[in-house]
Amino acid sequence: LSCIQGTTTSLLVTPTSYEIPSTVSTSIFTIGSNTNWTVNSSSTWITASITSGFGIRSNALTIANHTGTGIRFGTVTVSGSGISRIIH
């Protein structure tokens, strides 16, 4: 159970990091906020199922298959009312 109230803007994201496999996968994260928020990915191979909202929501990140060689890095930024939280 979560309760966010009052006049202070709050933006919580959990978890804030993932280790992902090289194959297609989906990871769930939760956003808790008392303001409108948006979700943006730094890479085309990471997509969020919900890109904007308000309040508490579970969201899915879909990670595309890695067909190249080497390690790939990407971030997802959740932003609202001048606050940003990064998932890496």
Image (cartoon, rainbow, N blue to C red):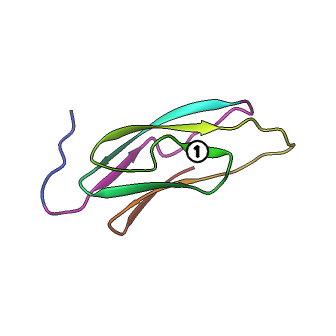
Q: Furthest-bottom residue in view?
A: 82
Who's the residue at 85% across and 43% down the image? 68
Residue behind mark 1: 47
Q: Position of residue 23 (x, y in %)?
A: 73, 30
Task: In this rendered view, identify the residue nearer to me: 86 or 36.
Answer: 36
In the rendered structure, does residue 79 fall within the stretch colored magenta? no
Residue depicted at x 34% and y 40% = 57
The answer to whether 30 appears left or right of 34 in the picture is: right
Q: Is residue 16 left or right of residue 5?
A: right
Q: Is residue 39 above or below residue 20?
A: below
Tell me which residue sits at (59%, 37%) in the image: 62
Q: Is residue 4 above or below residue 67?
A: below
Instruction: Measuring from the top left, give residue 17's x and y in whole percent.
Output: 54, 44
Frontmost residue, 52 versus 25: 52
Please tell me which residue is depicted at 74% across the width and 35% down the height of the picture: 65
Q: Quadrant of the N terminus?
A: top left
- Which corner quadrant of the image does residue 82 belong to? bottom left
Q: Is residue 33 left or right of 67 when viewed as pictured?
A: left
Q: Is residue 9 magenta?
A: yes
Q: Which residues are magenta?
A: 7-23
| Main SS class of the magenta portion in the image | loop
Task: Write down the quadrant of residue 35 in the picture.
Answer: bottom left
User: Which picture quadrant has residue 83?
Assistant: bottom left
Classify mark 1: helix, strand or loop: strand
Total label count?
Answer: 1
Image height check: is 45 above or below 80? above
Q: Position of residue 14 (x, y in %)?
A: 41, 42
